[in-house]
Image (cartoon, rainbow, N blue to C red):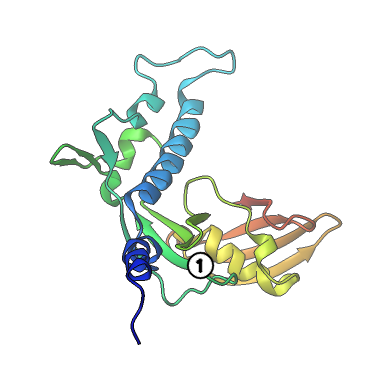
Amino acid sequence: MKFPAILLLLLSILEPITSQNILSDSILNEIQNNIIIFRIRNSAFLSISKYGTIDAIRPLFSKHLLDPKEKLLLTYEIKDDLKYPQNGYDIFIVSNPGHSIISGNVVQTTSALDFNLKLSEKFLIAYNAIERDIKYLGGEFYKSIICPDFPQGLDSIPFILQLKYFHYDLTEITLKHTRSTKYIYSAFSKSLEKRLRFKIDREYLDYIELVE
């Protein structure tokens, strides 16, 4: 069967865009912006007083600002063992190894201690290549609302917690208490080597408070 030339041309153009296991530079740039904005906002609290004055010679948030020719070193891999409940989405681990920055042809690695913050190097996203839609799942960046994508009920909560806090590598997730407005869950973090507690809003399951 022969295909019209125009169809073959369209397929050749669309193929790189819709490839399910590739994150384009523009998508990686969106992820980078989320990470940087999160880091700036959270480090600002360590440098700025409640009166709005800067309590440092060089505020911590300035360390996260990139020059126009700089970008975060981001690598990624698809997670075939994790399945997102909505069709068309693949889950990826995106890493910023060593909190590194690329400046020209030079890679600069920075210790998390230089930021006075506990910075994760790994982030979890779901990506739909056809719709070019990113869902920010887990890690220290701003997360997407994802609970409407899951079946309603308590059975979905352990997996939601594993996604949103995947950098803590949660196991033994159990429901401890049910209160009028909250579910109280307990889980063991392999990365932190301790148990954690979570308060989850019963009406909006995306509203999760970590109580260590």
- Badge 1 element: loop
Rendering quarter of residue 187? bottom right
**What amino acid type should be assigned to the residue bearing mark 1?**
Tyr
**Quick check: 94 above or below 35?**
below
Name the side, left or right, on which 68 lies relative to 82: left
In the rendered image, residue 41, in percent from the top left (x then y), is placed at: 49, 31
In the rendered image, residue 62, in percent from the top left (x then y), is placed at: 36, 24
Q: Residue at x 54, y 17 (%)?
A: 49
Q: Residue at x 32, y 49 (%)?
A: 25
Q: 67 or 40: nearer the eye?
A: 67
Q: 24 or 118: nearer the eye?
A: 24
**Quick check: 102 above or below 165?**
above
Question: Would residue 159 be seen by someone viewing this image from the given angle?
Answer: yes
**Quick check: 2 above or below 32?**
below
Q: In which quadrant is the N terminus drawn? A: bottom left
Residue ID for mark 1: 89
In the rendered image, residue 11, in percent from the top left (x then y), is placed at: 36, 68
